[in-house]
């Protein structure tokens, strides 16, 4: 009985497996389809490879018999149509329902365009298109910066008519609402750095120098850069998304029709708010990081907070703090202009909005690191 049961089960599996048999008929050699041609049955790796091999082997067959198929869905019909090369064979023997399904698949299938051959001329054209796109990006960025300078001059001439309410609103959203996250990240970075440095300095008996290393690294470099990266990911993306949504909802077109200057009402308030908020956020993040480093130094090395605070002014000159705040102003202006630049280039569709937001964040963070390296090289030569 067990043998009969095993044989019955094996036969059932063989009957449902999609396959193609070659048979001789009065009309000639015929490719007969068997089993179930459904997505579930074709999804099995062994079935899929066998069916693909059979389709290639019977590509030249002119007579096909589909009537023995137990079940066929659109996936099976699509596979069959693709195997025929998107052309009807000379003769197809099928039931009315199967024939209707094959006709529907044939009618709705779109042939993919043939891949273009890669040649030197094609590569040259691609390079030209890339250079043209990059040049367009830089031209728009220069135009946006020039318009910002003109708008600031207009604000200085008539300060009473300036968009102060917009500036204060952006200052609150960019600066005040970012205080918790920047403080938390800065505090944790300070703790991590202090623990790592304490392990290395203890080997040489130079525990006291942790104040010098933490102070100069956090105040001059890590504090401003960390705050800028956080703001670029948080507020830079928000700026691009806000202006991009205005493009999708045609608010920018309405502003142009009403004669409202987009640079004066959209770009300048965000740039000024970011330039004012970034130095304050940089100092705030640096203070949080120093607190974390001071706490970790006390726990790991026994350096009291009183000693840390007394040694810090001697280890770090005040010029480093002014340099950090100056860098932060440049970071803020750059993040705001990049966010506005990509927001104004968004096309009226959601896909372009997502691509513009992603490009804004990546470009902002990259430019922050590049400008920080430029500051380090320039001010090292000056002696600061």
Image (cartoon, rainbow, N blue to C red):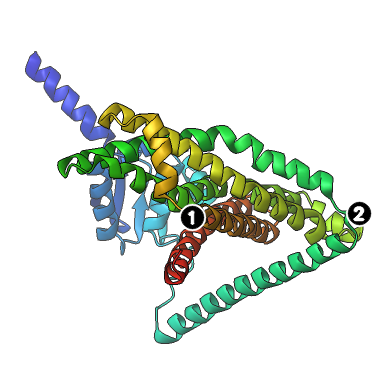
Comparing 384 with 169, the one in front is 384
Q: Which mark is residue 161?
A: 2
Q: Which percent across, then down, holds residue 263?
A: 78, 61
Q: Nearer the viewer, mark 1 or mark 2?
A: 1
- In the image, taking residue 52 as reference, residue 256 lies left or right, namely right
Comparing 87 with 51, the one in front is 51
Q: Which mark is residue 118?
A: none
Image quadrant of residue 193?
A: top left
Name the residue at 47% across, 67% down: 379
Name the residue at 40% across, 50% down: 216
Q: Quadrant of the N terminus?
A: top left
- In the image, taking residue 80 as reference, residue 101 lies left or right, namely right
Name the residue at 45% across, 82% down: 122
Q: Which mark is residue 320?
A: 1
Residue extending farthest to the bottom is 121
Mark 1: few, some, or many residues within 10 Å (few <14, many ≥20)?
some
Q: Which percent across, then down, holds residue 143?
A: 71, 72
Can residue 18 be seen in this snapshot? no
In this rendering, is residue 124 above or below 43?
below
Q: Which percent across, then down, holds residue 285?
A: 51, 41
Name the residue at 43% across, 36% down: 309
**First in sequence: mark 1 vs mark 2:** 2
Comparing 203 with 118, the one in front is 203
Q: Which percent across, then down, holds residue 273?
A: 70, 49
Say whether marks 1 and 2 touch (CB < 8 Å).
no
Mark 2: few, some, or many residues within 10 Å (few <14, many ≥20)?
few
């Amino acid at each position: 009985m067990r043998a009969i049961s095993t044989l019955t089960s094996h036969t059932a599996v063989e009957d449902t497996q999609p396959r193609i048999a070659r048979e001789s008929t009065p009309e000639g050699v015929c490719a007969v389809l068997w089993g179930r041609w459904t997505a579930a049955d074709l999804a099995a790796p062994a079935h899929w490879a066998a069916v693909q091999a059979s389709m290639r082997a019977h590509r030249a067959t002119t007579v096909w018999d589909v009537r023995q198929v137990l079940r066929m869905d659109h996936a099976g019909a699509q596979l069959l149509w693709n195997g025929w090369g998107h052309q009807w064979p000379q003769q197809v023997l099928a039931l009315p329902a199967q024939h209707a399904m094959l006709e529907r698949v044939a009618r709705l299938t779109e042939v993919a365009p043939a891949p273009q051959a890669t040649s030197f001329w094609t590569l040259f054209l691609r390079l030209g298109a890339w250079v043209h796109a990059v040049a367009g990006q830089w031209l728009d960025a220069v135009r946006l910066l020039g318009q910002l300078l003109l708008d600031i001059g207009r604000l200085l001439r008539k300060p009473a008519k300036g968009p102060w309410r917009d500036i204060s609103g952006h200052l609150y959203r960019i600066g005040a609402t970012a205080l918790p996250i920047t403080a938390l990240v800065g505090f944790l970075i300070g703790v991590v750095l202090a623990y790592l440095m304490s392990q290395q300095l203890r080997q040489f008996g130079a525990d006291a120098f942790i104040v010098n290393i933490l102070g100069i690294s956090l105040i001059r470099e890590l504090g401003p850069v960390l705050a800028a990266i956080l703001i670029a990911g948080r507020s830079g993306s928000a700026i691009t998304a806000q202006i991009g949504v205005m493009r999708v909802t045609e608010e920018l077109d309405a502003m142009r029709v009403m004669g409202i200057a987009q640079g004066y009402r959209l770009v300048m308030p965000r740039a000024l708010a970011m330039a004012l908020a970034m130095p304050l956020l940089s100092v705030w993040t640096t203070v949080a990081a120093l607190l974390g480093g001071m706490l970790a130094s006390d726990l790991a090395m026994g350096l009291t907070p009183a000693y840390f605070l007394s040694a810090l002014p001697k280890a770090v000159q005040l010029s480093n703090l002014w340099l950090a705040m100056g860098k932060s102003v440049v970071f803020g202006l750059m993040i705001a202009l990049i966010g506005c630049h990509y927001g104004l280039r968004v096309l009226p569709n959601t896909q372009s909005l997502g691509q513009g937001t992603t490009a804004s964040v990546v470009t902002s963070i990259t430019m922050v690191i590049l400008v920080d390296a430029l500051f380090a090289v320039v001010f090292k030569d000056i002696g600061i």
